[in-house]
Amino acid sequence: MSLNLAACHALMFRSYERVTPSLRGYDQFTRDLSAMRQLFARAGIATEGMPAVIVTGSKGKGSTALLTAAFLQAMGHKVGLVTSPNYLDLRERVRLNGRMIPEADYMRIINTLAPHLDAVEAVLPPGKYLSPTGLFLAVALCYFAEQQATALVLEVGRGGRFDDISLYRNTVAVFMPIMGEHLDKMGPTVADIAWHKSGIIAPGCTVVSVPQSAQVGAIIAREAAAQSAALLQIGQDVTYTQSLSAAGQQQVTITHKGVAQTFTLATHAIYQGLNAAAAYAAATALSPRAIDAQIVSRLRFAGRCQQVQAHPAVLVDGAINRQAAELARASLLPLKTSPLVLVTALPHDKDDRGLLETLAPHADTVIVTRVSAGHLHFNDNVLHTARRLHSRVIDQPDVDAAFSAAQEYAGSAGTIWVVGTQSLVRDALRFWRQDLLSVFAED
């Protein structure tokens, strides 16, 4: 019997959810790619052939993957893009030329893969599983092959060396800023994180890295040398300048090998300048062709300093620590009107103090909420921190009620900042009815 859409979604997470309660320890001990290799072999899924960019890092990798795909499409490529997590629909993880995989194709491919998945899963040793990241990659590669994609951009789920995305042989490896994240899975130090992420460097590929700490940079350079990979450094080999127009657009000029090109990005987020430079370096390393800048200018950045409503102005960003909050603040302050309402939700393991110390002083009202996703753990630390820092703090656990209250407090002339965990971004995009079918405006 054919699986319906809900059953297809459930199948993608079945194996992982079976073992989740017992998963403990670092990825090198809990993640095993051999089962996914068996699935690919059984289903006849190629893990090389199309030129591919793999993007990793602790922040900015989703935007950079999106920008890389846009640059490649602007060169004339038919581009397959894999990202995670999704916001409103699981199919957002698989896109071709910016448009998510059609429901009919998604269901058809999963139904085709289901017998292979069942056979591999049936003989898995205890504690081993087929990861959702790998299964979405399998669906994507089937779809991209059918559609005759000519270039791929693949965002790592977590880490790199033991992430299923690394199963595909890449031409370019991109490293966005690497810092202490998922220390319980890849740690215990930042050097360990860098070692995990440097595993995406394939023999003879091109490595693109944004500025890193000395320790992280040395690890990437050492791994690149070991794999005979060329290394391009943003800020040295590829440079950029940026400015914000009165219309809230970024003008980013990128210079490489003495040639400068200027692109307009429809975003308030100043951090997209660095992401664009890394994406440009990756795309031109993969395919040195002329770029149609108009395609890039139509790119939308869901949940990245994104304005989802005009009156009151509602701006949404996924900052979860001090550094990201500082970038969000620099991007959003020029758009501030009064009264300003900050709505935030952060799970127990995020930097609530750093975010609130950065953003709360600019707000007239702070609303602390939760999110609709049931898998995240929240405690009262965010609320207590907010009340130490601000005189007007409202505790509203229901996220939709928090958004409604923010609109009431802001009025038609005010501004709402929705800043916090990605699940809060997801709830905001749902509440303000955003259409994520395509990453391009007017597509």
Image (spheres, helix red, strand yellow):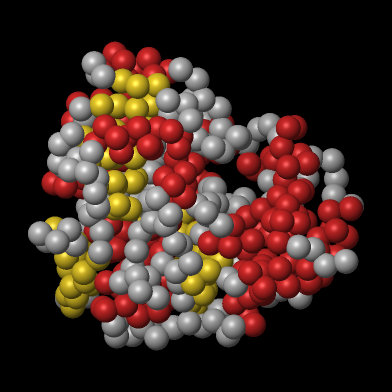
Rendered-image quadrant of the C terminus: bottom left
Rendered-image quadrant of the N terminus: bottom right
Closer to the camera, 353 or 431? 431
- Examine the rendered structure and indicate whether residue 364 appears above or below residue 311: above
Closer to the camera, 202 or 393? 393
Residue lying at 34% horizontally and 70% vertically, measured from the top left: 441
Total labels: the figure holds 0
Q: Position of residue 380 (x, y in %)?
A: 46, 17
Closer to the camera, 432 or 417? 432
Quarter assignment of residue 343: top left
- Examine the rendered structure and indicate whether residue 270 appears above or below residue 439: above
Quarter assignment of residue 110: bottom right
Q: Position of residue 125 (x, y in %)?
A: 85, 45
- Examine the rendered structure and indicate whether residue 383 appears above or below residue 64: above
Q: Position of residue 285 (x, y in %)?
A: 37, 74
Residue lying at 76% horizontally and 75% vertically, measured from the top left: 44
Position of 78 compared to 317: left or right? right
Quarter assignment of residue 40: bottom right
Residue lying at 89% horizontally and 53% vertically, measured from the top left: 122
Q: Position of residue 73 (x, y in %)?
A: 40, 79
Residue 285 can be seen, yes or no: no
Residue 286 can be seen, yes or no: yes
Residue lying at 67% horizontally and 73% vertically, measured from the top left: 104
